Image: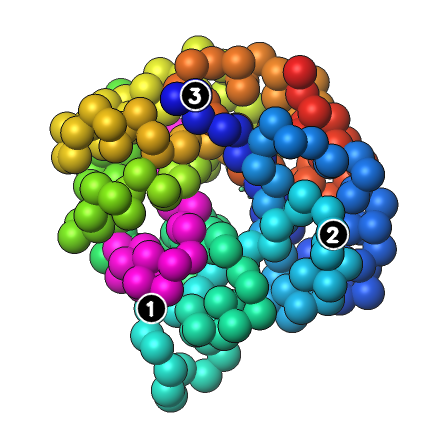
């Protein structure tokens, strides 16, 4: 069965709650489609107003992060039950900005992935190499390690429902998109790694996004590649252009 595309916006630390409602109202008619799953991952404080604003549309609201414990003395964190209680179905885990600025590691990513599955939340698991790693020719080795650790103790049935976002760090927020061949090469390697860890059926089912300066003019070529099942979009997700990315065909 063909995989349904999934196109997600990562708002990062942008949009106040009232700006979030305004943006969703603007984008709602522009992102209407049955052909792809459309997810807006928004700051924690925007989740409830965003869910309200998106009601009755095809937009699903996701979180940008989540903690791996159930509850307790973890000041400032958001628990999985807090997300499911309001109807959140997706969470970005291990974005490179969280790894760089908030000390996330492959191990904490794995704990969060396991916890998300435990609560029925679909993780969008991020991976991606630095420019130095690409230049040293270790991209695939590095990504395989990130994926193998992120999916430690995740069952095949869980992995089938996961989303992986391949986001080369040198392409995030830089305006430098990976070429569609570069993106396809790594996404194919990720799928092969999943087949190795699990089996062909799991590899065929899992959805792999590309992320890194995707815009309205690059989306169609990237998403046409056989192993790219959509995108994780930062900057362009905050503009009407996001509608063009969602309706890239
Ligand atoms: C991201 O933050 O996940 C991202 C891909 O950002 P941008 O599209 O702005 O490069």
Instruction: Name the front one of labels 3 and 1.
Output: 3
Q: Residue 56, which numbered label?
A: 2
Q: Find residue 174 and report its horizontal and vertical position in percent.
A: 59, 33
- In the drawing, does residue 15 fall left or right of residue 84? right
- In the drawing, does residue 187 fall left or right of residue 159? right
Answer whether labels 3 and 2 touch (C-beta < 8 Å).
Answer: no
Q: Residue at x 56, y 55 (%)?
A: 62
Nearer the observer, 102 or 58: 58
Relative vertical location of residue 138 with respect to residue 76 in this rendering, above or below: above
Q: Which residue is mark 3?
A: 2
Relative vertical location of residue 194 with respect to residue 163 in this rendering, above or below: above
Q: How far is disc 3 from disc 1 in space, using C-alphas?
A: 32 Å
Q: Which residue is mark 1?
A: 68
The stretch in magenta equals 110-133
Q: Residue at x 42, y 57 (%)?
A: 121
- Disc on the earlier residue, 3 or 1: 3
Q: Find residue 70 and report its horizontal and vertical position in percent.
A: 35, 77
Relative vertical location of residue 248 with respect to residue 154 in this rendering, above or below: above
Helix, strand or loop for disc 1: loop
Q: Which quadrant of the render holds ligand 1?
A: top right
Q: Quadrant of residue 231?
A: top right
- Disc on the earlier residue, 2 or 1: 2
Is 132 part of what is drawn in magenta? yes
In the rendered image, the quadrant that contains the C terminus is top right
Instruction: Name the front one of labels 2 and 1.
Output: 2
Q: How far is disc 2 from disc 1 in space, using C-alphas?
A: 31 Å
Q: Quadrant of residue 66?
A: bottom left
- In the drawing, does residue 227 fall left or right of residue 46? left
Q: Mark 1 packing: few (<14 Cα in 10 Å), some, or many (20+)?
A: some
Q: Find residue 144 and report its horizontal and vertical position in percent.
A: 23, 33
Can residue 121 be seen here?
Answer: yes
């Amino acid at each position: 069965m063909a995989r349904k595309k999934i196109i997600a916006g990562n708002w990062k630390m942008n949009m106040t709650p009232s700006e979030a409602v305004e943006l969703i109202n603007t984008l709602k008619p522009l992102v209407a489609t049955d052909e792809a799953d459309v997810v807006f991952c928004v700051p924690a404080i925007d989740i409830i107003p965003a869910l309200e604003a998106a009601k009755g549309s095809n937009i699903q609201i996701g979180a940008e992060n989540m903690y791996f414990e159930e509850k307790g003395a973890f000041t400032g964190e958001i628990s999985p039950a807090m997300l499911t209680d309001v109807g959140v179905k997706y969470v970005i885990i291990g974005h490179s900005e969280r790894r760089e600025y908030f000390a996330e590691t492959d191990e904490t990513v794995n704990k969060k992935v396991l916890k998300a599955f435990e609560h029925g939340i679909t993780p969008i698991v991020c991976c991606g190499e630095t420019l130095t790693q690409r230049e040293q020719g270790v991209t695939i080795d590095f990504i395989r390690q990130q994926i193998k650790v992120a999916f430690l103790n995740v069952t095949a049935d869980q992995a089938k429902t996961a989303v992986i976002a391949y986001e080369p760090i040198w392409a995030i927020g830089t305006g430098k998109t990976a070429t569609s061949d570069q993106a396809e090469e790594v996404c194919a390697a990720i799928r092969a790694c999943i087949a190795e860890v699990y089996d062909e059926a799991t590899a065929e089912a899992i959805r792999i996004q590309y992320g890194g300066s995707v815009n309205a003019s690059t989306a169609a070529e990237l998403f046409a590649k056989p192993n790219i099942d959509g995108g994780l979009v930062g900057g362009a997700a905050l503009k009407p252009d996001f509608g063009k990315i969602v309706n890239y065909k």
